[in-house]
Amino acid sequence: MKPRKEWVEKAKKNVALDAVKHVKDGFVVGLGSGSTVAYAIEEIGHKIRREKLHVLGVPTSYQSFMLAIKHGIPITTLEEHPILDLTIDGADQIDDELNLIKGMGGALTREKIVAFASKKLVIVADERKKVKFLGENNHPLPIEVLLFAAQLVMLKIREIGGKSVLREGKGKVGPVITDNGNVIIDSNFGLIHKPAELELKLKSIPGVVETGLFVKMADIVYIGKPDSTEKIERKK
Ligand code: 5RP
């Protein structure tokens, strides 16, 4: 077995290269957030220059905005292009039906809006993210919440079986404040057997801005392994 750090970085690069093959001339592309998609953003920049493409990007976070600028991807907005051809994004967990948990990078709300606006959502991840059921290994579900409602939302989440913590910042005291000026609650529900049901319950709590559950949104997932890449397409 190769040392973990070595194969994981290689796997992330490989899935990013596969995902960027979906980018075509004239496309408006949603740019997800995280360390895996960072490789894809870099490759989109290379591809634009190499193939002289006209491609525009819609970033989902300040991270992807800055990466797009760095790699020479012209930026646009959902105001100008409310329908996107493609989004490439990462994920924190992926179940057998290609439902996702996202948001460990705190960008879940814009990521979900941009994914929803896209004709195709391509997900890139290494195989540590693949699980049978979301919530395995005590993985929390990130939920973006108005600070005004945070305590109330945590109480209501407890009533439906979730244990929540307010995400704390690193490099700054106090809670993480998202790019939208809200806070993140990380809630543990154990194994999530019915993600669509949980999503409905959570979205009915006033103060919840968005959840990191992406139910039946991913069209294609590239899973990077130590020596290969697996492509999985969602059954329609
Ligand atoms: C950010 C996300 C990321 O896509 C997710 O956390 C995966 O990141 P990485 O590729 O660094 O593991 O949802 O909100």
Image: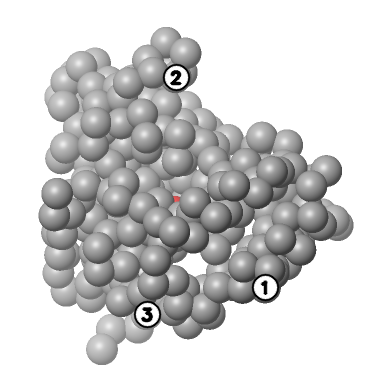
Residue 4 circle label = 3
Marks 1 and 2 sit apart, C-alpha to C-alpha, by 34 Å
Residue 173 on image: x %, y %: 86, 57
Whether pointer 1 and pointer 3 mark residues with C-beta atoms closer than 8 Å, the reply is no
Residue at left 40%, top 56%? 196
**199 or 7: which is nearer to us?**
199
* Image-quadrant location for residue 42: top left
Residue at left 36%, top 46%? 89
Q: Which residue is mark 1?
A: 163
Residue 227 circle label = none
From this view, report whether residue 119 is shown above or below residue 126. Answer: above
**194 or 150: which is nearer to us?**
194
Q: Give the amino acid type for the residue marked by disc 3 in the picture.
A: Arg
In this rendering, position of residue 22 left or right of residue 214: left
Q: Which residue is mark 2?
A: 78
Helix, strand or loop status at disc 3: helix
Q: Give the amino acid type for the residue marked by disc 2 in the picture.
A: Leu
Marks 2 and 3 sit apart, C-alpha to C-alpha, by 38 Å
**3 or 131: which is nearer to us?**
131
From this view, report whether residue 99 is shown above or below residue 111. Answer: below
